[in-house]
Image (cartoon, rainbow, N blue to C red):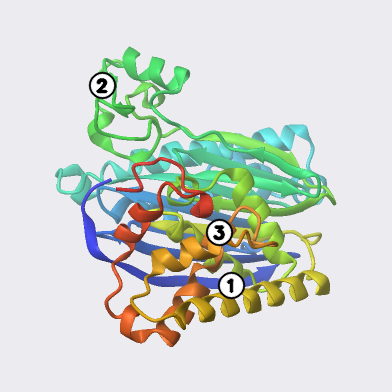
Amino acid sequence: MGALLEKPKTEKQSEAGGGNGLKYGLSSMQGWRIEMEDSHTALTTLQGELKKWSFFGVFDGHAGARVSAHCSEHLLPSIMDEENFRSGVLGGKDSIIAAADEEDVEVVKRAIRTGFLKLDDAMRHMPEVASGEDKSGTTAVCSLISPHFIFVANCGDSRGVLYRRTGIGFSTLDHKPFNPCEKERIQNAGGSVMIQRVNGSLAVSRALGDYEYKNVEGKSQCEQLVSPEPELYVEKRTEEDQFLVLACDGIWDVMTSEDVCVFIHSRFAITNDLELITNQVIDTCFNKGSRDNMSVVIVAFPNAPKVEPEAVQREMQLDALIETKVTEFCDQPGQVTMPQLMRMLDEENLQHLPPGGGLAAKQELVDGLFHKLRPDCASAAPSYPPLLRALRASPLLNCKPSSAIP
């Protein structure tokens, strides 16, 4: 994962917006990583004849931030500049905008794929990249949303998940070197998969950039050790659609797709503030042990869950109960630590903890109370890594064994 900071940077970059009947929230945090390498894009209304379309993307950079930043700015234009896309959508043909049919879907899919490949080829000639000064790369998960379809493209191990009223509608596939089809391509290009990485080094098998893995003579652009080809998913929009999640692997390292979706679903019942919900996703993943950069975009469809007064009341009661328990514990004489507080709360078997998030979703509340009630102990509290190590065996954080936890 690269070098880590002695103290995490927990400030968040977050925002929210809306348009075309959609609402979105996004949040990102540098965390423990030495550099913030993630980028994102959120456009609820595209320009011109595509004003009814929206575009969102998360770009998880590695070995530097240059390629991820460039892709966040240039991927959509690269897709829109593809000749077939322009002639099919911008050249007077409005069926994609008004009532897309199967043939039009294929036009958009080809444009997305070509846009990825053209951008990857163009970035190879950027001066810093061509000189070998910059060796960075990025995964990409993005979505074009039309009035009738949801297009999702994934390249790497970031992930997109569509949640419907009945549960997960679909989830993208992470492109890992040990996946059979990915491993076969890598080996056919003369590479190997060691310690689940390309040539024992790169943890993803598809990415934009990473040109040191894309120089095998006699192999096409998509047959290299690392491929820039996105995997495409198309879903017809329905009234069952509730929200779409796009996030980097800093999220998925510590929470499953189901965990993230049920957690977000439960937060919709508490608040309609999507920026707040994305911040809570980031905080929960940080508390569960993620040591990577973290970025998440949530796109809410018109039939997203609504605030439920009963759920709000339960949440208030839960927070009040946690405050009472923490106060009682902090009133005891002697040294008090955060691990002790969290273990105590875990042993209480608290009801109505956020599904998917568990007690980790309430750690900010506990930490705030701890600093308020026992500043003498809080000032001497250990940093988060010792706290996580102490709690690793406990189910309260739902941490899965991962390189994200030392």
**Apparent side of residue 306 relative to residue 394 in the rendered image (left or right):** right
Real-space CA distance between mark 3 and mark 2, rounded to the nearest whole angstrom = 56 Å
Q: Is residue 344 shown above or below 324?
A: above
Give the residue number, with chain letter if any, for mark 3: 347
> Depth-wise, is mark 3 or mark 1 nearer the camera?
3
- The image position of residue 102, as x and y in percent, is 76, 33
- The image position of residue 186, as x and y in percent, is 34, 20
- Residues 172 and 235: in front is 172
- Residues 318 and 257: in front is 318
* Quarter in which the N terminus is drawn: top left
Q: Secondary structure at mark 1?
A: helix
- Residues 165 and 398: in front is 398
Using the rendered image of the protein, determine whether residue 93 is visible from the camera's viewpoint: no
Q: Residue at x 63, y 36 (%)?
A: 233
Real-space CA distance between mark 2 and mark 1, rounded to the nearest whole angstrom = 46 Å
Real-space CA distance between mark 3 and mark 1, rounded to the nearest whole angstrom = 28 Å
Give the residue number, with chain letter if any, for mark 2: 216
Q: Residue at x 75, y 66 (%)?
A: 269
Give the residue number, with chain letter if any, for mark 1: 276
> Depth-wise, is mark 3 or mark 2 nearer the camera?
3
Q: Earlier in the sequence, mark 2 or mark 1?
A: 2
